[in-house]
Amino acid sequence: MASEKVVVPDIGGSEGAEVIELLVAVGDEVSVDQGLIVLESDKASMEIPSTAAGKVTELFVAEGDQLVEGAPIAAIEVAAEGAAAPDSGSAAQPAQDEAQAADDAEPAAAAPPESPRPAPAAAVDEAPAPATDAAPASPPAAQQGAGEPADVYAGPAVRKLARELGVQLEQVSGSGPQGRVLKEDLQQFVRGALAGERSVASGQALPAVPEVDFARFGEVEVTQRSKLDKLTAANMQRSWLNVPHVTQFDDADITELEDFRRGLKAEAERRGTKLSPLPFVLKACAAALRDNPKLNSSLARGGEDLVYKQYCHIGMAVDTPAGLMVPVIRDVDRKSVWEVAEEVLTLAELARERKLTPSQMQGGGFTVSSLGNIGGSGFTPIVNTPEVGILGVSRAQVRPVWDGSAFAPRTLLPLALSYDHRVVNGGDGGRFLTRLVELLGDIRQLVM
Ligand code: CAO
């Protein structure tokens, strides 16, 4: 049996191109013109077809390799005499396979199913990208089928799969290099569509943000994001896209609260705990939620129902080296300030050690995100859906406040309440925040 080496044909440029996808593995049977690898240059992505039919016995390339014309790609053990000839009409693979292979990379649906594809040198880069020098960082267009968008960046195999699934590629966000749409992106999109997250045929895709090659402007370091970071990002984006956010601001005068808290320092030490302003904020939220139950509700049945929670479980954002975590303190309304303080410490420590159990992060009806220890005078938190409200707490500061006859130094705690405007109206949000400010300004009311 003869062995034939497939090499990179003329790909129209001397700079070479990067291998971005291997379409076959050693041991695979391939037919003439079947794609072996996908190359990507500055101008286009292109599938390099096999010039022989048979078994792949060796692959000389790996993803990321830079190839130029003449570089070896694979060794093919030619299956049968005559099988390698594209025009012999007796290729080892069934005609239908060939038709599919042709369909993979044929830019126009002109070729009849029986027609073998043109010779490799002509088959590559049949649809050169309309990339211009003015926008070198924009993703280049790949080969495309008739009626397919030219500005979507995807390889022939992905385009074919998209056609089969009836997915309009411009609706899919690409996670590959330079925003290239990968097979996994397509699969994820379809999964999302099946879960009712978006309609495949709705045509309401978000325009993808083009990838920029930052290394062109200076030295960069690329790191792999943690799973937690990516999960948080997905949750944030889901909330941001689904929830019409409104944020209201106010300052709570916590001068007396701070005096009281400082007076409890010795008692806190005796109990072996710490008492920051946060447990008071959590207790005040519980009372304000009781008075404004809409802030402790969630939409259900696609917005048909509103679920009012009869319990008061509050999530607390914790900044950890691994990323953001939100453990939930249960029944805040039924616990003392000391008990809440103890849980803040325990859950924050568990979060930082990545020892939280899933149940410790579930069931929240409202969230508090406190950046008080970090700093800043205000921020707009993103609602932790399906909750409808979140309170952002910033650093307390002593400021002059006019008391009617003079300026007095008061400790003010900046608060920002973000809410889902599908559920919470400005009036509801305003009443909740005003009540919270009242409670924190006079914590004696917390025992009422
Ligand atoms: N204003 C001024 N000082 C504050 C304050 C505020 N709003 N909040 C806390 N402090 C002080 C505390 O009193 C403490 O000082 P003392 O020891 O002198 O009393 C100090 O800051 C440190 O507090 P802490 O962080 O240890 O405790 P905490 O109860 O305030 O917060 C926790 C606990 C887990 C919420 C916090 O450590 C944390 O991780 N915060 C970040 C949350 C976050 O990332 N949110 C953003 C989410 S969106 O990306």
Image (cartoon, rainbow, N blue to C red):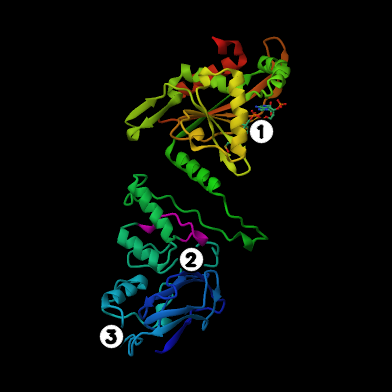
Q: Residues within 10 Å of mark 2 (few under 14, many from 20)?
A: many
Name the amino acid, label 3: Ser
Distance from the alpha carbon under mark 1 to that under mark 2: 42 Å
Magenta segment, which residues?
168-180
Name the amino acid, label 2: Pro
Residue at 54% across, 19% down: 335
Q: Are marks 1 and 3 in contact (CB under 8 Å)?
A: no
Report which residue position mark 1 lands on.
376
Q: Residues within 10 Å of mark 1 (few under 14, many from 20)?
A: few
**Residue 90 makes an appearance in the image:** yes
Q: Left or right of 41: which side holds 440?
A: right
Q: Earlier in the sequence, mark 1 or mark 3?
A: 3
> Could you say which disc has been placed on residue 87 in the image?
none
> Could you say which disc has been placed on residue 140 in the image?
2
Q: Earlier in the sequence, mark 2 or mark 3?
A: 3
Quadrant including the C terminus:
top right
Quadrant including the N terminus:
bottom left
Q: Is residue 241 above or below residue 161?
A: above
Distance from the alpha carbon under mark 1 to that under mark 3: 74 Å
Q: Secondary structure at mark 2?
A: loop
Q: Secondary structure at mark 3?
A: loop
**Residue 383 makes an appearance in the image:** no
